[in-house]
Image (tube, helix red, strand yellow):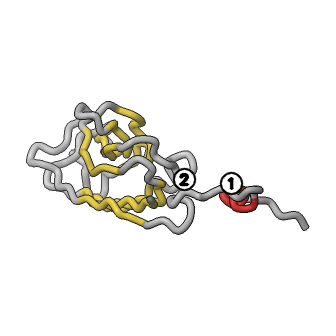
Amino acid sequence: MAFLNSDQMAKVLALPPQNLKPNEAHGDVHTLAWTFTTPAGGVPINDVVRLGKLPKGARVLRGRYANGAMTTGAGVATAEIGTYADDGVDTLIDVDAFQTATSVDAAGEADFGNTIVKGFLSELSQNVIVGAKATVEAWAAAQGFHGVIEYAL
């Protein structure tokens, strides 16, 4: 039987041993929680709801949101969850860093940031604003979009 090592275990077993980052072992888990209710006019296609900020070095563990029925009847309301630079002008980094366009047409909930392709265990190289972009159809008025991202530092 052979043993293979994760990247972190290889650091521990190296000679001399290498230190792990706190976001790799024994770090603190933090949450970024948000609540948002769509305004009277709804949220137009391509508008972005700023959900919150994540710090440089954060390692994303997972995210989850719950949403009201966002449909206005004009198509399928969808959301992309991505990252924007914390630079005063919210420069786009990756529109779907944590979630590609996913239906929020009917009330429901979903996990995001939970696959290797979509942010799971990614370490942020800069401070970012997390944003949810309305795509395909505008979001209806007076609907909730609430969620949380868990991350290690």
Q: Is residue 54 left or right of residue 88?
A: right
Mark 2 is on which residue type? Answer: Thr
Task: Please tell me which residue lies in front, 73 or 124.
Answer: 124
Residue 115, which numbered label? 2
Q: Is residue 86 above or below residue 62?
A: above
Q: Quadrant of the C terminus?
A: bottom left
Estimate the x, y position of residue 95 in percent, counting from the top left.
39, 37
Residue 13 shows up from this direction = yes
Crowding near pointer 2: few (<14 within 10 Å), some, many (20+)?
some
Which residue in the rendered view is the most extreme toward the left? 40
Q: Secondary structure at mark 2?
A: loop
Residue 13, quarter of the rendered image: bottom right
Q: Is residue 148 left or right of residue 25?
A: left
Residue 84, quarter of the rendered image: top left
Residue at 53 percent of width and 54 percent of height: 121
Q: Is residue 1 left or right of residue 25?
A: right
Estimate the x, y position of residue 110 in percent, counting from the top left.
40, 59
Task: Please tell me which residue lies in front, 146 or 69.
Answer: 146
Judging by the rendered image, the residue that carries numbered circle 1 is 7
Q: Secondary structure at mark 1?
A: helix
How many marks are shown on the rendered structure? Answer: 2
Estimate the x, y position of residue 4 in percent, counting from the top left.
80, 60
Q: Is residue 60 left or right of residue 147?
A: right
Residue at 77 percent of width and 56 percent of height: 15
Q: Mark 1 or 2, which is nearer the eye?
A: 1
Q: Quadrant of the N terminus?
A: bottom right
Q: Earlier in the sequence, mark 1 or mark 2?
A: 1
Residue 85, which numbered label? none
Task: Please tell me which residue lies in front, 127 or 42.
Answer: 127
Mark 1 is on which residue type? Answer: Asp
Task: Please tell me which residue lies in front, 91 or 24.
Answer: 24
Residue at 59 percent of width and 58 percent of height: 20
